[in-house]
Amino acid sequence: MKSINFRSTYGIQDLRKVNFKKINESLRSDIITNGENCKNLEKLICKKTASKFSVVCNNGTSALMMALIALKKKKFINIIVPNINFVAIANIASIIGANLILCDVNPKTGMVDISTLKKIIEKCKKKKVTPDFFIPIHYAGDVLDIKKINNFCKKEKIKIIEDGCHSFGSKKIINKELIIVGESKYSEMTTFSFHPVKNITTIEGGAITTNNQKIYNLLIYLRSHSLKKTNIADPYKMILPTLNFRMGEVNALIGANQILELDNFRKTRNDLVSYYVEKLDNLKRYIEPLNYHDKDIFWHIFVIKINKSFINKKLKFMKFLKQHGIASQIHYKPIYKHSVYNKTILINDHKYSENFYKSQLTLPLHTRLEKKDIDFIASKILLFFKNN
């Protein structure tokens, strides 16, 4: 069997501890979707996030879509989202007829902070635009100061849906309070993705956590075409038009197994991050890693920022890494740069997002990476910048 170069992907699943015997048993079961395995995974997610309720679904995009549909009370809504963002939320906005308000990010973290949020709200008021929702991202595995954001959004009557797709398993003490991603203490809901490159995987899958019983009850219906069982003569009642967002039983079984490995995954990733930071310390003239000092954070991706005087060499650098079997990726191209969303965007703050995008690069980080891989990566980075 050909050996795999684990430097050639920025992220990959780790299914080495999966119980395939149980998977085979599950496949022989009468119920293979949205059954007891899904309910068990939901209980485990609640336990890990300290939330009251959890609803699993077929992917992280579905989780975001379900969350918005659950809260949408009028035909047209305005959503604040970070400009540094995956296209999923912009696609959802286009599909459900929502408008986007693109908020700038702090270039040091890649996340929206209270100052950039206040700035976009001021612009909204000047243009007489009323935001309905804010969907901030816990970027790269880091944790937002969601309490401060919530205090501000409450005053502005803006509801928060946290995007935790990068940060399942992350927690952080902020202003002497432990913030757990997914606890949803300062938001209506938190959404997660369990795609193969994420902190844990269900192959494909997602979840929503909330502490609101009414929202939870609605999400249960939304997950399965919003059909409510009635009686034998009238088999079901349609609550509102949605789609099929159900998770398979095998996916849930894998997810439960992954949660058992969560602490090991976190330790492995964080050890690798610490080693990266150590190995790249002598390259500060050329690059600097994102803030990777908190040991409780469950780092999803390893992000470096190329220093200003070397930004024009970024594409050449990426090609050089690829030639040496080293993956790199960009997280993310700002939403406003996708012209397909022009009619969806109401307000666009992008100065710092543009700077972050130009300097940002993601290097390999996953539990199958080894320190010798990081040694190799660091040596090639040094070689490139010495010669360029």
Image (cartoon, rainbow, N blue to C red):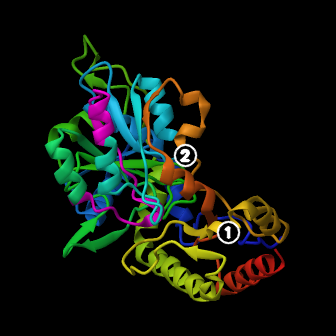
- Quarter holding residue 52: bottom left
Is residue 275 or residue 320 the one in the foreground?
320
* Left or right, 50 with reference to 264: left
Which quadrant of the figure contains the N terminus? Answer: bottom right
Identify residue for label 1.
Answer: 309
Q: Which segment did they paint magenta?
A: 121-147
Is residue 47 or residue 270 the one in the foreground?
270
Q: Is residue 190 visible?
A: no
Q: Amino acid under label 1?
A: Ser
Q: Amino acid under label 2?
A: Pro
Residue at point 23% right, 41% down? 216
Residue at point 14% right, 44% down? 155
Q: Is residue 348 visible?
A: yes
Identify residue for label 2.
Answer: 334
Mark 1 or 2: in front is: 1
Which quadrant of the figure contains the C terminus? Answer: bottom right
Mark 2, Cα crowd under 10 Å, few <14 / some 14-19 / many 20+, is many
- 131 magenta-colored: yes
Contact flag, marks 1 and 2 (Cβ < 8 Å): no
Residue at point 79% right, 81% down? 386
- Residue that sits furthest to the top in the current view: 233
